[in-house]
Image (tube, grey):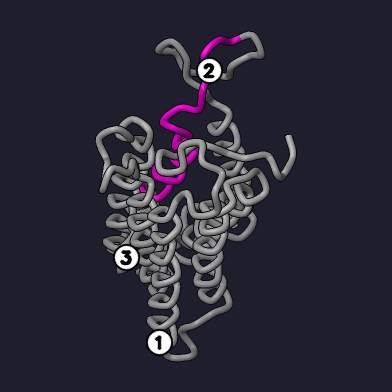
């Protein structure tokens, strides 16, 4: 496998190697850039003592996610695939750490351990493959094995983590809870549409061109990230008098 090896996994591109083979998938990445700009403006409206480097890092990562995804949907090779999924993975880890520490009051040491555990679960989940109505870790002799849910299965741990954090915050009556839970709901729809991209390829046709549903993954993901950026502005436990249940 080389960085220049072409990747054909989405409906709109098919097996076309042209730079603009995915015009809708490429253009829909503007949604990430808009989300980052709105998130930055929301942050700048906050008093300076309520902003932190973490907030700016999260905004920057959303912007980078848009650029990385744009690069992949233009060039569609192994190198730009890493530029696509890498920033998403970093954002998931950074936001999980932010939520655990700044929202739930989990001590830094435990936050790091939980983030490492989450990364391990994601890495393991991404190795799962489906074949003949089975799911597991396919061997070299497994016939017909392919990524489950069109490769979307690796995002399920993030959806679970997001939902759990939202529910914990709701139990604590934290101001960020509704934003996190709405983000989880939108993300669930987003994952579903990403998973159906190839399955609905023949049904999603505009002007004789198959477009799939991957563009909706971009738009809804951008909305998910914007909701999370908005939630981040409520950093800090809702009820500081309550001690976290984690050992210091």
| Circle 1 SS class | loop
Q: Main secondary structure of the magenta part?
A: helix
> Residue under circle 2?
145
When asked about the image quadrant of residue 52, the answer is: bottom right
| Circle 3 SS class | loop
Query: Does 158 lie within the magenta span?
Result: yes
- The label nearer to you, 2 versus 1, is 2
- The label nearer to you, 3 versus 2, is 2
Q: Which residues are the magenta region?
A: 142-163
Instruction: Give the left or right position of residue 65, taking residue 45 as reference.
Output: right
> Residue under circle 3?
174
Q: CA distance from mark 2 to mark 1?
A: 50 Å
Instruction: In this rendered view, identify the residue nearer to me: 136 or 25.
Output: 25
Which mark identifies residue 46?
1
Asked if the residue at tag 1 contacts the one at tag 2, i.e. Cβ–Cβ closer than 8 Å, the answer is no
Dot 3, crowdedness within 10 Å: few (<14), some or many (≥20)? many
Q: Position of residue 19 (x, y in %)?
A: 55, 53
Q: Position of residue 127 (x, y in %)?
A: 58, 29
Q: Going 36% across and 71% down the picture, which residue do you hit?
A: 230
Question: Which image quarter holds the C terminus?
Answer: bottom right
Q: Position of residue 134 (x, y in %)?
A: 44, 13
Asked if the residue at tag 2 contacts the one at tag 3, i.e. Cβ–Cβ closer than 8 Å, the answer is no
Q: Position of residue 36 (x, y in %)?
A: 45, 72
Q: Going 59% across and 43% down the picture, which residue do you hit?
A: 119
- The label nearer to you, 3 versus 1, is 1
When asked about the image quadrant of residue 67, the answer is: bottom right
Query: Which of marks 2 and 3 precedes in the sequence?
Result: 2
């Amino acid at each position: 496998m080389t960085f220049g090896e072409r990747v054909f996994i989405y409906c709109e591109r098919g097996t076309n190697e042209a730079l603009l083979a995915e015009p809708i998938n490429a253009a829909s990445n503007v949604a990430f850039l808009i989300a980052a700009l709105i998130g930055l403006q929301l942050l700048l409206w906050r008093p300076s003592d309520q902003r932190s480097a973490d907030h700016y890092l999260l905004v920057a990562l959303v912007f980078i996610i848009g650029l990385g995804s744009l690069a992949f949907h233009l060039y569609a090779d192994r190198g730009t695939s890493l530029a696509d999924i890498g920033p998403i993975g970093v954002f998931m880890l950074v936001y999980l750490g932010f939520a655990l520490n700044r929202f739930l009051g989990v001590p830094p040491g435990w936050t790091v351990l939980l983030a490492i555990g989450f990364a391990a679960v994601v890495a393991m989940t991404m190795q799962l493959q489906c074949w003949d109505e089975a799911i597991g870790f396919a061997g070299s002799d497994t016939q017909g094995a392919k990524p489950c849910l069109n490769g979307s299965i690796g995002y399920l741990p993030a959806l679970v983590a997001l939902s759990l954090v939202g529910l914990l915050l709701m139990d604590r009556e934290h101001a960020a809870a509704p934003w996190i839970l709405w983000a989880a709901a939108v993300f669930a729809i987003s994952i579903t549409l990403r998973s159906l991209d190839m399955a609905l390829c023949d049904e999603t046709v505009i002007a004789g061109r198959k477009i799939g549903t991957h563009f909706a993954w971009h738009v809804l993901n951008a909305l998910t990230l914007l909701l999370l950026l908005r939630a981040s502005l409520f950093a800090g436990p809702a009820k500081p008098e309550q001690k976290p249940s984690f050992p210091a």
